[in-house]
Amino acid sequence: MELNRDRFASMTNGLANGAMNLRHAAKRVWIMPSIRIPNELAPGKRPRVTLSPTIVVGPGKNLIALSTPGGDQQDQALLQVLFASVEYGYDSQSAVENPRFQSEHYVKSFDNHEMKPGVLGLDERMASAVFQELQRRGHKVEVKSRYDSGSAPVLIRMYPSGVIEAGADPFYFRFSQAW
């Protein structure tokens, strides 16, 4: 149950009617008995949600906390930001500003639960050779504006020395401060 979207209006409406108001979370779950999918609301199932706050504890007491809004893009965006930081050595700000891709090859959690097999969204800042090679391999490539990536990650990294480094996606009007 989400209470932070519009404060208490949804909570009071749901409680006044004697029912729990699932609001946004209900959009992510199928309640159609004729369609059998893993994300259905049924006994023994675990319908997915798109919340992905992440904490990573690394060697030497390194600590990274990252999160993003963005529905189905959250896990994809966070993994790319995490890899840019940990595997490729980007500082926090560079990691969140780095161009990202998005697979659309899944049943969407929202609205009409659309699926786009083979579709791959690429940030407009990626090299044209990348677009061409992925198209040659059969992907249906869509160009995404850096202002329309579907996510807005924030990463905070705490080093053993006590230094705190932070980065936030400026293309979605996020900002960060650290010391």
Image (spheres, rainbow, N blue to C red):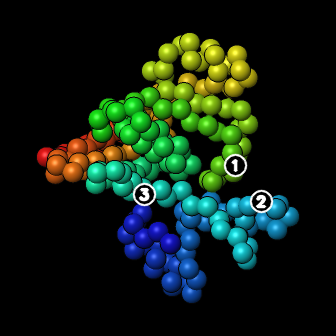
Quick check: 15 left or right of 155?
A: right
Residue depicted at 54% across the width and 13% down the height: 128
Q: Nearer the viewer, mark 1 or mark 3?
A: 3
Q: Position of residue 155 (x, y in %)?
A: 33, 46
Q: Position of residue 121 (x, y in %)?
A: 58, 30
Quick check: 152 left or right of 139?
A: left
CB-based contact (under 8 Å), mark 2 and mark 3: no
Categorize mark 3 by other alpha carbons within 10 Å: few (<14), some (14-19), many (20+). few
- How far, Cα to Cα, is label 1 from label 3? 22 Å
Q: Is residue 43 visible?
A: yes
CB-based contact (under 8 Å), mark 1 and mark 2: yes
Residue depicted at 56% across the width and 18% down the height: 130
Residue that badge 1 annotates: 107
* Amino acid type at image mark 2: Ile
Of the two numbered discs 1 and 3 on the same chain, state the one appearing first in sequence.
Answer: 3
Residue nearest the viewer, comparing 13 with 94: 94
Q: Secondary structure at mark 2?
A: loop
* Amino acid type at image mark 1: Val
Quick check: 138 left or right of 68?
A: right
- Count of marks placed on residues: 3
Residue nearest the viewer, comparing 143 with 86: 86
Residue that badge 3 annotates: 53
Residue depicted at 70% across the width and 16% down the height: 136
Q: Secondary structure at mark 3?
A: loop
Residue nearest the viewer, comparing 3 with 67: 67
- How far, Cα to Cα, is label 1 from label 2? 10 Å
Q: Is residue 98 above or below residue 28?
A: above
Disc ID at residue 37: 2
Q: Secondary structure at mark 1?
A: loop
Q: Nearer the viewer, mark 2 or mark 3?
A: 3
Q: Is residue 138 above or below residue 152?
A: above
